[in-house]
Amino acid sequence: MGAGTDRWYMGSWSNDPLAMKRALYMIGLLMLCSGCYKDEVVIAELNNNPFDPDYVGAMLFTLDTVLLEPAPAPPGGVRHAMKFSVNSSRFLTPTSYQVYVKDLVTGDESFLGQFPLGSDSFTYYRSEISGDEVCLELRLANELSVGRAETVCGTL
């Protein structure tokens, strides 16, 4: 065998310039085929996630009960408790979350965490007790964003 001739080495040609061209052609063909047509995503129609402010689905929050509960000591006494639940069956995937609460009477704002973890029942406590209707603005919160606002109202 003379200098510059091809040799068979470990199952391939060691000096085959066409082997590299064929490999590059196959990689290019594979990339072209993997980019086949896919349905277009219409951003305006992405409104089925309850954690998005533009969510258009059914109500997520249900007021369960409004009652007076003993307040922990000190200072003791009683406090106004509003118990509500979240319909987590509307979530696209199971996830942990918080509920952002804004008391529309006092303007107080807070985040309520799941307790115990995985629970869909929440309780908002107010120290101010009145016989008037109290409304809460509720939003799902997850990873520094909040969803659509919903209002629940109850009278003690």
Image (spheres, helix red, strand yellow):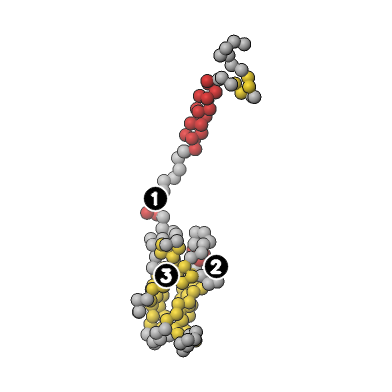
Is residue 110 shown above or below 47? below
Q: Is residue 5 left or right of residue 112?
A: right
Q: Secondary structure at mark 1?
A: loop
Which residue appears farthest toward the right when viewing the image?
10
Q: Quadrant of the N terminus?
A: top right
Q: How many marks?
A: 3
Q: Position of residue 72 (x, y in %)?
A: 49, 84
Q: Do the residues under discs 1 and 2 have CB atoms within 8 angstroms? A: no
Residue at 59% from the left image edge and 16% from the top image edge:
6
Query: How busy is the neighbourhood of tag 2: few (under 14 within 10 Å), some, or many (20 plus)?
Result: few
Q: Which residue is mark 1?
A: 42
Q: Nearer the viewer, mark 3 or mark 1?
A: 3
Mark before the other along the chain sequence, 3 or 1: 1
Marker disc for residue 100: 3
Label 2 and label 3: CA atoms lie apart by 17 Å
Q: Which residue is mark 2?
A: 118
- Specify few, some or many for label 3: CA neighbours under 10 Å numbering under 14, 14-19, or 20 or more: many
Q: Give amino acid for label 3.
A: Tyr
Does residue 35 sit above or below 8 in this rendering?
below
What residue is shown at x 50% (from left), y 28% (from top)? 24
